[in-house]
Image (spheres, helix red, strand yellow):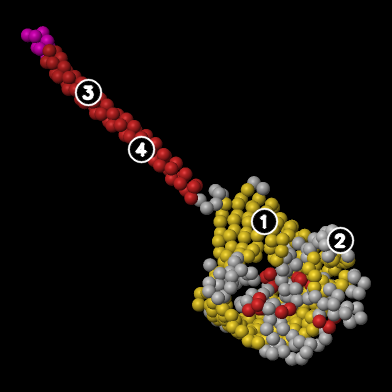
Amino acid sequence: MFLKKPLGLAVVLVGVGAVFGQAQAAEVDDRIAELERQIAELKSLVVNNKTSIASNIETLKVQTQDIEEARPMAKGTKFKYGGYVQLDAIASDYSEGKPAAVMDDLFVPSLIPVEPLTGSGDSYTSTNIHAKSSRFYFGTETGTDAGKISSFIELDFILSGQGDERVSNSFSSRIRHAYLKWDYAENKSLLAGQAWSTFFNVGALPDLIDFVGPVGTVFERQPMIRWTSGPLQLAVENQTTRVNMPGGGSLVVDGQLMPDLVARYDAQAGTLNWSIAAIGRQLSYEKRPIASEEVASDETYGYGLSLAGKWNLGRDDLRFMASYGDALGRYMGLNSFNDGYIDANGDIDTIDQWGGFIAYRHYWSDHWRSNISLSASQASNPSLADYDAAGSLAKYYRSMHVNLNYLPTPKLLLGGELLYGVKELEDGRDGDMYRLQFAAKYVF
């Protein structure tokens, strides 16, 4: 009996174990099946994602190609564009007659009419409205292993020889600036192209509505090669000579071998920014009735010095320039004096000249500001014994500008300016002009 009971118990235990074993096996099979299902789903997702990723990559390639084709500049090059639109309304009164047409657009001191040899001239008045001083520019900047390389081109429409005012006022554009600049190291650069002359401190020019401004300012743009190292600038610039000929009249010659040589140094003392510049020039002329025959020629050398600056007085500022030399000539006042004259022996003689201005800008409020500029220039002309047409040479110029400008927003200007200018010849004849100019200008 005892033996039978253990044997039955063992049989029972074996049966129970078999049941539990079958149950565990079934559970394991279910888990394996679930894992296999999940793995299958993951494989399906991976395949689908690969297809989607490949499709997205192809889409991105197409979009990138479209972007590169539509890009206005090469990759890695920054592009800029700007300028301003300006309308000028100019009313002028001349005491001694009608000037050349260019005076309708801007103030050119040498073109102020003076009284004729026969006596007083008749006064002349005119009104002109134009948009020729509007301008625009393009510029680029590209970073390279050799440094930053930039370019700049600027055009306006002043002094256009094409078009007229009868129907369409369709005037052509002209180059103001066209240069490249290579910044090859910190504060070191090389500029090649047409730009403001190194002899001219543009930052000192008064804030006037007139296109140029004072009679005594240096004002010149021309082709050059300029090297800059910190505050020092050295340049070789395009050469041209304009001389007064015997009996009157003038001759322009660009046959000089030596370019104009310019050195300039910029400095700062507190709120005063100033510069000093020097120029050396070869002046020459030759007369050739036919190209193969030279009947007269000569050459000489001259110099010029210029001190200019801007002194910030809080929000206001004071601007100034003073220049002196015997070869300032075409560099000052839009060529208001020539570079020299041809004497009785056929030699070039230079003429000592000086010029300058002082200008003050005052802010009345955030939206109103005014400028006043006083300027003069003068030449030490030869006597009649040295030059037979000395009496017809310009002796001095004077000018004054006063304006009031309203700026409803910093880039929009509505202003008015009063200009007075006078010119006197060596023989005492003179003439003056008054001008009232209104302008609407938007900088973009």
Q: CA distance from mark 3 to mark 4?
A: 34 Å
**Residue 430 appears in view:** no
**Farthest left residue in view:** 1
Which residue position is annotated with label 4? 52
Q: Which residues are magenta?
A: 1-9
Front position in the image: 333 or 254 = 254
The residue under the point 41% across, 39% down is: 58
Q: Quadrant of the N terminus?
A: top left
Under tag 3, what secondary structure?
A: helix
Under tag 1, what secondary structure?
A: strand
Which residue position is annotated with label 2? 293
Q: Are marks 3 and 1 in contact (CB under 8 Å)?
A: no
Please state the horizontal and vertical placement of residue 170, each as a whole percent of the image: 56, 69
Q: Amino acid at mark 1?
A: Lys
Q: Earlier in the sequence, mark 3 or mark 2?
A: 3
Q: CA distance from mark 1 to mark 2?
A: 42 Å
**Residue 392 appears in view:** yes
The residue under the point 78% across, 82% down is: 396
Which residue position is annotated with label 3? 29
Please tell me whether residue 132 belongs to the stretch shown in magenta: no
* 190 left or right, relative to 39: right
Q: Earlier in the sequence, mark 1 or mark 2?
A: 1
Please state the horizontal and vertical placement of residue 103, each as a whole percent of the image: 66, 78
Q: CA distance from mark 1 to mark 4?
A: 48 Å
Under tag 4, what secondary structure?
A: helix
Image quarter for residue 235?
bottom right
Residue 181, labelled with which disc? Answer: 1
